[in-house]
Image: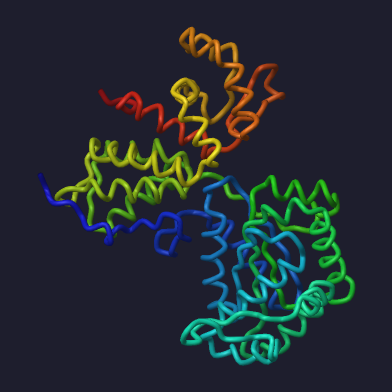
Amino acid sequence: MGMHLPPEGSPFSPGLPVSAEYFVGRQDEINLLLQQVGQAVAGRFSVAFITGERGIGKSSLAAMVRQIAEQEFQIAAAHAYMGGAHSATDLVKRLLEQLVKDNYSRPWYEAIQRSFGNHIRQVGLWGVSVELAAPQQDMEAMARTFPATLQALAGKLQPERRGLLLIVDDLNGLAAQPDFAHWIKSVVDEIGTTFAGKLPVALWLVGLEERRQQLITSQPSVARIFHLVTLAPWDSAECRSFYKGAFRRGGVTLEEGALDLLVDFTGGLPVLAHEIGDACWRHVTEGVLTGDAAFKGVTEAAEIIGRKFLDPQVFDAIRSPRYLSILRKIADSNLSLNSFQRQSMLALLTEEEGKVLDNFLRKMRDLGVIISDAESGRGVYRFSNRLFAVYFMIEARRAQKAWPGHS
């Protein structure tokens, strides 16, 4: 047996934002976001919403453009995650605290420190980190006067920094709060009237399209305030470019059949490309990834993907052999990325599976795995997102121990 590569040498980074050298495509989106930063440093506040399906690379795009913008436009930036946040005050506290943390070692940190005075304190055994320890009433006041807070902060940073880029990620809890939608709308309106041309700040929200729709439902006028940046799945050429570049940097040659297989199973989702690539890395021998080794990697990645990206309730539900078999047959029907019809599915199922199909559809609908596709007709469904569809396609192939064109 040939020598396998050390895992620490893997060029893939599952679960982490993608570094610039592994970034593929998105040039139009990158240019649009950089234009927004350029507009901001000229004093014209801009707000964008970066959206797309789960696993499409929204956070990675924001993180990479931030790096470019810090260099090209001399701005200070922060990228804050809002998991568990439920109010505008929560958002402001996390965002400003992240600004403090992200710029702690930068030459302009003293200006940020002056802005918050004794509200910043060092934490950790050796004082190697910081946090914003402002009283709740002060944070609430900053949320109420957020445009003025940003203007004062941006002013303190000049001339070292020309403006601010603030990235608000993971909106799950916030988007469900009607008050938050009204707050973000009032912030943008106040900036447009009171601070027009005087606020060198770009604010980016990052989230699923469902989160943007939640905001619009709570406050319809929100629909018009964002510059919308929508990420589409990679096409096959972009997917091939990613795998070829990543393995090449690791000194690995890809058999053509292996590359075709990886592209087929990635479904255009960067998050899956990193999981699949990392799993396949462990099966490289003598500097070559063969088709058989790639298939072993893909099937191993399926278990990792299921546990990481499926809700625990979904993962538990599909442990049912009948349910998993039905899902595999749906995914293997070559309709997985589009819609499937209940009646057509019955023809593919065993008698026992057919008996539980309606219960299965109800359960998967309740868990958010599938949704009704009313526009396509009665009894028509589709997977709620591409990640589910691709995962079950991999599961179907794993069950068959084969992939298209392989025997």
- Residue extending furthest front? 125
The answer to whether residue 174 is above or below residue 213 is below
The answer to whether residue 145 is above or below residue 311 is below
Q: Position of residue 329 (x, y in %)?
A: 46, 21
Count of numbered marks: 0
The answer to whether residue 317 is above or below residue 241 is above
In the rendered image, is residue 75 in sight? Answer: no
Q: Position of residue 209 (x, y in %)?
A: 67, 47
In the picture, which quadrant includes the N terminus?
Answer: top left
The answer to whether residue 114 is above or below residue 193 is below
Q: Please indicate whether residue 300 sits to the left or right of residue 310 in the image.
A: left
Q: Residue at x 59, y 62 (%)?
A: 31
In the rendered image, is residue 222 in sight? Answer: yes
Quarter of the image holding residue 80?
bottom right
Q: Please indicate whether residue 144 sits to the left or right of residue 209 in the image.
A: right
Closer-to-camera residue (403/329): 329
Q: Position of residue 113 (x, y in %)?
A: 64, 89
The colour scheme used here is: rainbow
Q: Please indicate whether residue 101 sits to the left or right of residue 404 in the image.
A: right
Q: Residue at x 48, y 45 (%)?
A: 269
Q: Residue at x 30, y 27 (%)?
A: 401
Q: Residue at x 40, y 44 (%)?
A: 304
